[in-house]
Image (tube, rainbow, N blue to C red):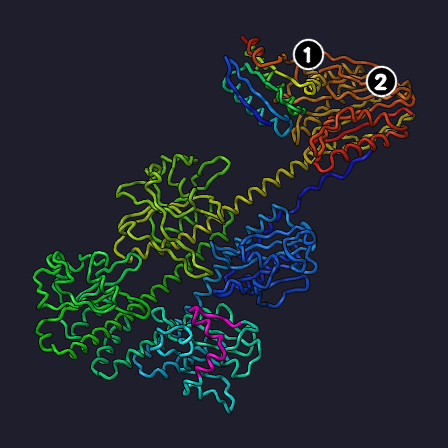
Amino acid sequence: MELIVNSIENCEVVAVDGRIDSYTAPQLSDALNKITGNKVFKIILDITAVTYVSSAGLRVLIDIQKKCKKDNQGEVYLVGIPPRVYETLELTGFVPQFKFFDDVPSAIAAFQ
Amino acid sequence: MSHPPLPPSNNQPSDFTLIEEISRSILSNLDRESLLNSSNTLLHQIFGFSKVAIYTTRGHDKTVLKKVSVTTEGLDPESIYHSEDDLGPVGWSVAHRETVHISDTSTDDRFPPGAYDQHTCSELVLPLLHGEALLGILDLCAEVTAAFTPESVVAFQHLADTLAIAIRNANLYRVEQSRRLVAERLQDTIGAISIDISVDEVLDHIFDELEGFLPWEAAALWLVDTDSAEAGIEQFISSFHLAAYRQKHPPSSTGIGHYVQDFDAARQLFSQYPWTSQVITQKQAAVRIESAEYEPFGALLGFGNRYSALAAPLLLHGQVLGVIVCVDPEPEHYDDDSIDILEVCAGYISNAIENTRLYSAAHDQAWITTVLLQVAEATQSITTMDDLLETIASILPDLIGASACAIFLWGASIETFYYEASSGFDSDQADRLQAWDASPASNAPFQQLLEGRSPVILDNEIISSEAAATIFPGYNFDKDVLILFPLLGRNVLSGAILVKFLNSELALSSAQEVWDEKYSLVQGAANQAANAIENLQLIKSQAEEAYISVALLQVAQAVVSLNQLDEILATIVRITPILVGVKRCIIYIWDGTQQVFNQSQHFGFSKNDLSGFGQAIKSSDFPLLASIKQDGRIIYHVLEPLETPARWREISSNDCQAFSEVEMGLDGEEILVKLGEGEFSGKERLLIGFPLSVKAETLGVMLVEEEEPLKGTLSIHLREKRIQIVKGITQQAAIAIKNEQLQEEAVKSERMERELQLAREIQVAFLPKKIPEIAGWDIDVHWQPAREVGGDFYDILHLEQHKIGFIIADVADKGMPAALFMTLIRTLMRAAAKDETSPAAVLKQVNELLIPDTENSVFVTLFFGVIDPDTGTMVYANAGHNPPLLKRHNQVELIELTRTSIALGLFNDIEVGERAISIDAGDCVILYTDGITEAFSAQGEMFGVDRLKNLLNGGQLTSAHQLSSSIIEAVQAFITGTDLSDDITMGVILRK
């Protein structure tokens, strides 16, 4: 898994590449917690290049979403979700917890 | 239902713990033989190796080693091993000084098939290195393949390091013992000889003493004709004659004696049996090994091919004077001890022979002999250098008819002469001589003396007008005759004597032959003085050697006897200042994870000294530490008079320098530390930083601050010795740190292993012990845990009205937290199912109860189905779990029992739905966790739902067990070559 973090406008865009499983989830979790630790709660997660999300990965997504949505501070938007990952979200019932976007600019626009 | 055996857990003490125990027991063993045998035996017994062998280098030859080994048949007799003849791993390791690990001797093709012992299936060969020097090889053979894990290889490498230190300590101790032995017995003999005249008598004495040190049947002394010493080596060797010979049990008619008289016959003999000549060409002692060439006496006495011989060269000024040989018919009679002893003896013998020759040369002139005797007698009982030099300076003018003299000693390490004593000069002149820069680089007379090693007359040509004016004011070099004589001792130039003759004396003795006589008289006295000086220096350096051995052994003792690293390092920082006389000493340990130096133990610092230092220090905040760590070399910084420890952190790496030459000697020989020339005058106080390194890895740094400004050359010598000792100490400190780190890792992995084991035990304890028998139904569950608990669980509940509840769930966590969370859900489910009949209501209640306990968004996906066994109706609720599949007996299409709720544990007040289906005879429900569908193949492909569905479509359904087994087998086949990363759970409910 690889991570690229960019600040655009008032949000952080995190592009993830590869598998989010129990081995890589802690790395993603650390990166996201660092962002919320800096009081930025508008996060765009670009998961276009993600091949697999395990339950540990789902846990990271849900956890950061709960943190961002707390007290209406912000939200995590998912960009470019691959069908297989969407299925995983659907299976567990997490789909309603997220807003989905096709590309980063539209997600940024939605935050403004 | 099938539970495969749990993955093996490791509750035995780890290799490292065992090795640590062995290390401790061997480190304090100073007896080499028992050290090697006990190491072998311990390794053999504790680890059950089929063979354990330790090879140790002997003497100077690094290709012939001594082998001691233990096999299942017991202790093997000691034998000699030639690494050059061995194409196997041991030979390779000797040549390359690297570890060789052979996991399977039948498939490893690096060495020829015959390179292994018959039953050896895996082998680990470890070089025993101390610094750069190879001390030996540790060879471990096992009768099973893959006996060594990567972790155990690291642990055994550590043991090899420890063993190398133990062997070195034992070597140091041994050398020290033999030095002391020889010195005690020979000193008196040689002292007595100094006033003796006959070379024969000298040699006779020596043979007498030699019998006490070494076993031999015959001993001989070959001497070279000094005239041919400059000739080529061929001619040189053929010029040896037999000077003395002794046999312990001479037969009645020995014909050997005539070789002593007959020089030609002896020379011919020497050339015919040339083994001894290697000792002469290499200027090193040697032990004859089985089936080597003969030397003359083995041949003359008719010894068998395996007889032993030991020879050491007699060296004088680096020239070979002769060679001493011992022979014995027994094989393997001489070892490293014998070499040490004979080498020390040879040193004394050379000295005695040279002295005797000097005396003989002066014998004709009785009065010269008297002078020499007087010098010898005056100096014989003196034990300190100052006294000796004072004595020589005060008696010399009278003895040789001069008005004054001054003694300068040569400091080889700083390449200068320095004033030591004088008599006959007035105190102002003595002061001026003391202030004279006698460095050959800037002082012509001393330069000429150093180069020519012959007397130099001081005149206006050689003395600069500046020196004449400042050092010798009021002197007239035409009238005052000043001559500089070299002090030539046994091996080297040890100094110079400046002698002042009065002009009137010269006028009386202006004839050339009187001059010559005077020259040889002074030179003879100077030689005698030089011998006395060298003897004293030798005794002093022997005392220092002994001191170093004792110091290092003390540290070794501390490392062995203490358990805690802190205690060991605390002892080291306390011992170091006492042993070497430094002011402060502090250790920093490098933490590779945090990338910081941690301040460890220290001595001699006040609170204020260290107040500026945090406990953890970044490299960038302390450049001195950073450069020592980076270079792995000993570095010094010249301290300003008032530079306090609080300012050490500001020292930039530009203000530090590495010592230009710091070398380790081979095999227990002294460590050579030569301070660079001109790097500092020697009077500054240094802060010296030592890397604490094991192999190439620097684990920490020790800083040592010198006490007072140093004075003179002897202090430079002291500094060299000091660095030598501290270097020895830091090696032991580094080993102790490495120990601790390895132990921590072992403890940590043991703790993790215990936790894994406990988590699995909890998980197993809360799973149903057996599947209930229900009439008309066939139920099977397969559950297989991953190494780390994956959070799968299932349960079967007996509910009211004979209904049966099925639960399959997966906690989104691993290890102990998952296991504990699982037990919580099981308890909540069982409690809720008692009160509620609706599965949806049960899940809703469990979710509400779970919320306060979930941290970091741990959630659980869970399927709960309640079956009425009589009607076949199943009411279910699915909280985000992989949809179970319903396979109708009469239908190809599978029915997915999809989600009726979000996963549990995350959100309050969730909506939970439930559905009802009917399970008819021949239908079955397949429940599973994502361990099945998200199993990955070695190629990274996912098993997926489709593969599962395809498996269900094929073939006739005969039993629940048959179906679950076939699915599990398919998954196992799919993931071949990978580790099971998640738990796998699969349940089949078949209505008959």
Residue found at x 47% / y 44%? B699
| Res. B557 in view | no
Q: Does residue B179 show up magenta in the picture?
A: no
Relative image position of residue B366 (x, y in whole percent): 22, 83
Q: Is residue A58 depicted above or below B340 in this figure?
A: above
Observer-nearest residue: B103 or A64? B103
Relative image position of residue B886 (x, y in whole percent): 84, 20
Host chain of mark 1? B
Residue B265: image quadrant is bottom left
Residue A94: image quadrant is top right
Identify which amino acid the numbered label 2 is placed on. Met
Query: Does residue B672 appear to the left or right of B566 in the view shown?
Result: left
- Secondary element at image label 2: strand
| Res. A36 in view | yes
Q: Which residues are magenta?
A: B266-288
Residue identified by numbered label 2? B874
Residue identified by numbered label 1? B909
Quarter of the picture holding the C terminus of chain B: top right
Q: Main secondary structure of the magenta part?
A: helix
Identify which amino acid the numbered label 1 is placed on. Asp
Image mark count: 2
Residue found at x 17% / y 75%? B400
The disc label shown at residue B111, or none = none
Of pointers 2 and 1, the one earlier in the residue sequence: 2
> How many neighbours does mark 2 have within 10 angstroms: few (below 14), some (14-19), or many (20 or more)?
many
Q: CA distance from mark 2 to mark 1?
A: 25 Å
Residue found at x 52% / y 60%? B29
- Secondary element at image label 1: loop
Q: Is residue B965 depicted above or below B211 in this figure?
A: above
Relative image position of residue B935 (x, y in whole percent): 72, 30
